[in-house]
Image (cartoon, rainbow, N blue to C red):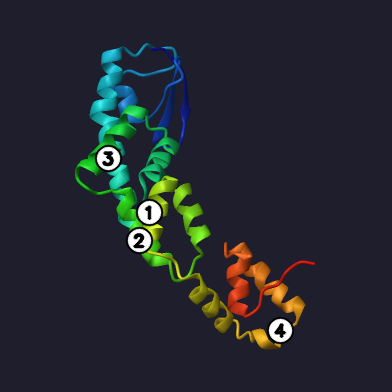
Amino acid sequence: MTVTEIVPVDKRRSKVILDDDFTLVLYRGELRRFSIEEGSEITRDVYEEIIREILCKRARERVLFLLKSSDKTEQELRRKLKEGYYPQEAIDYAIDFLKNHRFINDEDYARRYVEFNSRRKSERQIRFELQRKGLDKETVGDILKEQPVDEAAIIRDYIRKKRLCPKQMDAREKSKVMASLGRKGFSYEAVSRVLGEIFVDD
């Protein structure tokens, strides 16, 4: 492996770009320790030592730090590590470490997420957000069956907080309410039921 370029990331770290399209981020002292400079060769043994002794451990510490602030899914953690230029071997090691020690479990995360958000978000919005976080459609669907979202209660709460009176609203005001709730993922039918009437297009 040939070092084609070394690009500073900040005052202490640099990106080491290799000819086979690998990128490593190392500290200045690590560059000196392994005699890494532009145009130099990195043997397979040295590359594996860097991965094993430095980057795997650093990736593990990074994900543990990320989990201190808030729960995250496997996909979110993988994305964070990838953004930090960790190689795939280090990413896989860090995620396997978390799984083996039961620090992450996407299904448990999804259950907590649904429990926390089911009183303020629509089912559609919850589905979208969990799938964006890496949960598959089937798992999300099963969890929502276990913990259904009471959309009517959320819509009533919205109307109450906005101090709206459906009986006194004209068509324009009702349309605005429906559009606002529709942007939050609530269906036309669900909003119509709560407002007390179904609007049918001519």
How far is mark 2 from mark 3, CA to CA?
A: 33 Å
Q: Earlier in the sequence, mark 2 or mark 3?
A: 3
Q: Residue 166 carries which label?
A: none
**Residue 23 appears in the rendering:** yes
Q: Which mark is residue 142?
A: 1
Residue, x 52% and y 79% (percent of image)? 157
Image coordinates for residue 74, horizontal then vertical, percent = 35, 44
Instruction: Give the residue number, with chain letter if any, for mark 3.
Output: 60
Closer to the camera: disc 4 or disc 2?
Answer: 2
User: Would residue 50 appear left or right of 187 to someone viewing this image?
Assistant: left
Instruction: Give the residue number, with chain letter if any, for mark 2.
Output: 146
Element class at badge 2: helix
- Categorize mark 4 by other alpha carbons within 10 Å: few (<14), some (14-19), many (20+): few
User: Would residue 158 appear left or right of 144 to someone viewing this image?
Assistant: right
Identify residue type, mark 4.
Answer: Met
Element class at badge 4: loop
Q: Earlier in the sequence, mark 3 or mark 4?
A: 3
Asked whether disc 1 touches disc 4, contact meaning CB atoms under 8 Å apart, the reply is no
Q: Earlier in the sequence, mark 3 or mark 1?
A: 3
Closer to the camera: disc 3 or disc 4?
Answer: 4
Element class at badge 1: helix
Instruction: Give the residue number, with chain letter if any, for mark 4.
Output: 169
How far is mark 1 from mark 4, CA to CA?
A: 38 Å
How far is mark 3 from mark 4, CA to CA?
A: 56 Å
**Residue 70 appears in the rendering:** no
